[in-house]
Image (cartoon, rainbow, N blue to C red):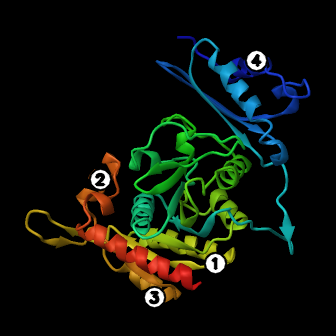
Amino acid sequence: MPVLTEQNILDALRRVKAPDGGDFDAREMVEGLNVNNTPAGAEVNFTLAVDPKNAAALEPLREAAEQTVRGVPGVASVSAVLTAHKTAPQMRGGRPEKMAIPGVRHIIAVASGKGGVGKSTTAVNLAAALAQNHKTGLLDADIYGPSIPRMLNLKGKPQVRDDKKLVPMQQFGLAVMSMGFLIAEDAPMIWRGPMVHGALTQLFRDVAWNAHGDLDILVIDLPPGTGDAQLTLAQSVPLAGAVIVSTPQDIALIDARKGLAMFEKVEVPVLGIIENMSYFLCPHCGERSEIFSHGGARQEAKKLGVPFLGEIPLEIALRETSDAGEPLVLAQPDNPAAVAYRKIAEAVWAQVVTR
């Protein structure tokens, strides 16, 4: 199998003509090109930076670029994404203007200051719990590590409507969209900040979130930390609030505190803190062990003056159901963690509608 380089791909892309007869290289449209050579062939990912006003018209061009690269000997898979980050956002009073997502009543974010605290698991189960009483969507905004497709057992690519908008995938009563639907599962996303901004903006604007009916609430699973994705979200869409997920130990709470401060700076209300992995109940003897300490998130919430939403135990079933692709709140509704998620969903919804 030949070893391909970025230059091989750029050479191929020069054969694809833009509407005015130019090529990608000359127009500086190709960004974030990544070639991952594997024993089965090269996995190629890149973005095409375009003016947002021309994005719909350039969709055939994106498809042609994908097809051309797919024809390069040694290419196993290819994914091209249009990004529209070259035009500055509309401003109001010196700040980017937030634009509502058509057909979406409320938008909340699930965030964490650091990785590994169970944020995506919480987002999936919170969304599934909300979907039992409300029309709910779930957006996987973790561009670098999208895990929602695996956790909901979703595969394939979303349909594209005549107006070039993507139709969310449907699973467990949820309308779901993720960058993971558009790239290979093991493909690395080697993107700079502006490209992340462009991709997230498209997931907000170029997805027909109301394709299967208007949504009462859209849950957004953010990547960990306080970087480009969080800033893009806070500046682009009117968030009803953010939910912070943390584990009880001090090192995690330090990062959770940073996440909370970030949302306060961008004037997004914090709906509360969830303590995940709060304790462990032995399935054999019933003994309780506080592996990562206990109560730290509750104390932090009290100190910072935000609601404490609840405790989620460290539960084997959470790992098993996540790997199997079915939320715990649906697979085992009587499980203590599932009960806790439903109570948290009720508390979140009550705050959203009140605000």
- Give the distance between the C-alpha atoms of the residues marked 2 and 1, in whole angstroms: 34 Å
Kind of residue indicated by mark 2: Thr
Q: Secondary structure at mark 3?
A: helix
Residue 106 lies left or right of residue 303; in this view the side is right
Q: Earlier in the sequence, mark 3 or mark 2?
A: 3
Q: Secondary structure at mark 4?
A: helix
**Which image quadrant: the C terminus?**
bottom right
Q: Which residue is disc 2 drawn over?
A: 321
Residue 46 lies left or right of residue 281; in this view the side is right
> Taking 137 as reference, is 167 above or below it?
above
Label drawn at residue 132 = none
> Taking 62 as reference, is 181 above or below it?
below
> Taking 124 as reference, is 83 above or below it?
above
Q: Are marks 3 and 2 in contact (CB under 8 Å)?
A: no
Q: Are marks 4 and 1 in contact (CB under 8 Å)?
A: no
Kind of residue indicated by mark 3: Lys
Q: Earlier in the sequence, mark 4 or mark 3?
A: 4
Q: Nearer the viewer, mark 2 or mark 4?
A: 2
Q: Which residue is disc 3 drawn over?
A: 302
Q: Nearer the viewer, mark 2 or mark 1?
A: 2
Q: Which residue is disc 4 drawn over?
A: 11
Q: Which residue is disc 1 drawn over?
A: 264
For mark 2, does the 10 Å Cα neighbourhood hold few (<14), some (14 to 19), or many (20 or more) residues?
some
> Taking 234 as reference, is 37 above or below it?
above
Q: Earlier in the sequence, mark 2 or mark 4?
A: 4
- Give the distance between the C-alpha atoms of the residues marked 4 and 3, in whole angstroms: 59 Å
Q: For this rendering, which residue is in front, 333 or 226?
A: 333
The residue depicted at 55 percent of the width and 54 percent of the height is 212
Q: Are marks 2 and 1 in contact (CB under 8 Å)?
A: no
The residue depicted at 57 percent of the width and 72 percent of the height is 258
